Image (spheres, rainbow, N blue to C red):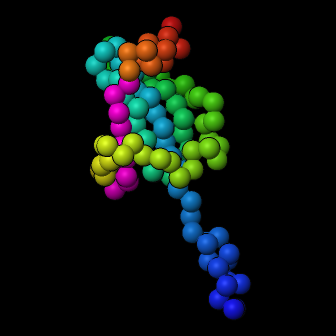
Amino acid sequence: MKFLLLLPLIFGLIPSVNARVVYIVNHGRINIEERCQDGKAEHQIWHMDERGKVQKLNLKGHGNKYFKNPELIPSDIYKSEKGYLCSQRQLTKKEREAYDNKFK
């Protein structure tokens, strides 16, 4: 019975995982949505110009609880160089154009 009283304390000490959800757009070369369980609660568009300069735009929900414990895209889960679980998918043409237009 005493063990049941300690459960909330034990679970309270487990760190939560945040998701990084980034839409990467680069005029037809790289157009992906990437999700990583890397401890960051980012929701951004990264736009790369022809020279390789990256502009970042924060989207609604950037930094809040909505991005904790992300659902990774089940068909393409991999481990990043730093050991985080990540997934990615190709953006549709409509999504790519909408995100690209935010930088014009």
Residue 54 can be seen, yes or no = no
Percent x, y of residue 36: 42, 46
Q: How many marks?
A: 0
Position of the N terminus, as image quadrant, is bottom right
Q: Is residue 84 above or below residue 5?
A: above
- Residue plotted at (31% across, 23% down): 30
Residue 102, magenta (yes or no): no
- Residue plotted at (67% across, 85% down): 4
Secondary structure character of the magenta stretch overall: strand
Residue 84, magenta (yes or no): yes
- Say left or right for 48 vs 76: right
Percent x, y of residue 13: 61, 72
Q: Quadrant of residue 76?
A: top left
The one of 59 and 51 positioned closer to us in this rendering: 59
- Residue plotted at (57% across, 50% down): 68
- Say left or right for 32 vs 101: left
Q: Is residue 28 above or below residue 85?
A: above
The one of 29 and 8 positioned closer to us in this rendering: 8
- Residue plotted at (37% across, 52% down): 85
Q: In the image as oriented, which residue stretches furthest toward the top?
A: 104
Residue 18 can be seen, yes or no = yes
What segment carries the magenta color? Answer: 83-91
The one of 58 and 53 positioned closer to us in this rendering: 58
Percent x, y of residue 32: 36, 28
Percent x, y of residue 26: 35, 19
